[in-house]
Amino acid sequence: MRTRPDAVTTITLPSGPVRVDEAGYLTDPEQWTRDFAMLVAEQEEIALRELHWQVIAFMRSHLDEHGIAADARIVLKFLGEKLGVNKASAKQALFELFPYGYVQQACKMAGMRQPRAWSTG
């Protein structure tokens, strides 16, 4: 549990300014742009491929439709269906795409707020 508010910083991107918390997560998911995802990917040393963008688009769509970020289990189901693989293979694919974890990399790139406590599947 946090005892103090996050320090917020403004980052200027080609698509416009965005506000991020101390860990680099957007404070407002509505500010997300592809420029932001590319910045995070560069910081995380990830070369974004088509499957990355499909996962990010799915996560953004889930947020728009349900008003909450997609839990890792939901993204694993999406990947399993997309790739035609079982849950274990989907989990392996997710960690190949985002090697330092779903929350640290995928959620940040997709413009989700930093989760306070969350099941990661």
Image (cartoon, helix red, strand yellow):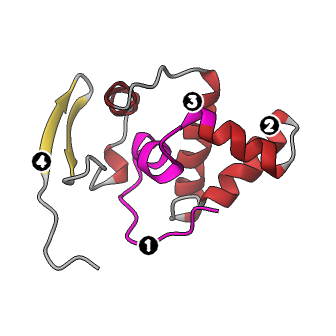
> Label for residue 117?
1
Whole-number angstrom distance, CA of label 3 to CA of label 1: 25 Å
* Picture residue at 66% right of the left edge, 51% below the top: 75
What secondary structure prevails in the magenta region? loop
- What is the quadrant of the N terminus in the image? bottom left
Horizontally, residue 74 falls left or right of residue 64, namely right
Establish if 67 lies above or below 60. below
The amino acid at mark 1 is Ala
Quadrant of image for the C terminus: bottom right
Earlier sequence position, callout 3 versus callout 4: 4
Return the mark for residue 53: 3
- Mark 4 lies on a secondary structure that is strand
> Residue 34's spot in the image, x, y percent?
41, 29
Q: Position of residue 93 (x, y in %)?
A: 69, 37
Amino acid type of the residue tagged 4 in the rendering: Thr
**What secondary structure is found at the residue carrying circle 1?**
loop
x, y (%) of residue 74?
68, 57
Which residue is denoted by mark 2 in the rendering?
Answer: 82
The Cα–Cα distance between marks 3 and 4, rounded to whole angstroms, is 25 Å
Query: What residue is disc 4 on?
Result: 9
Indicate yes or no whether the magenta region holds residue 31. Answer: no
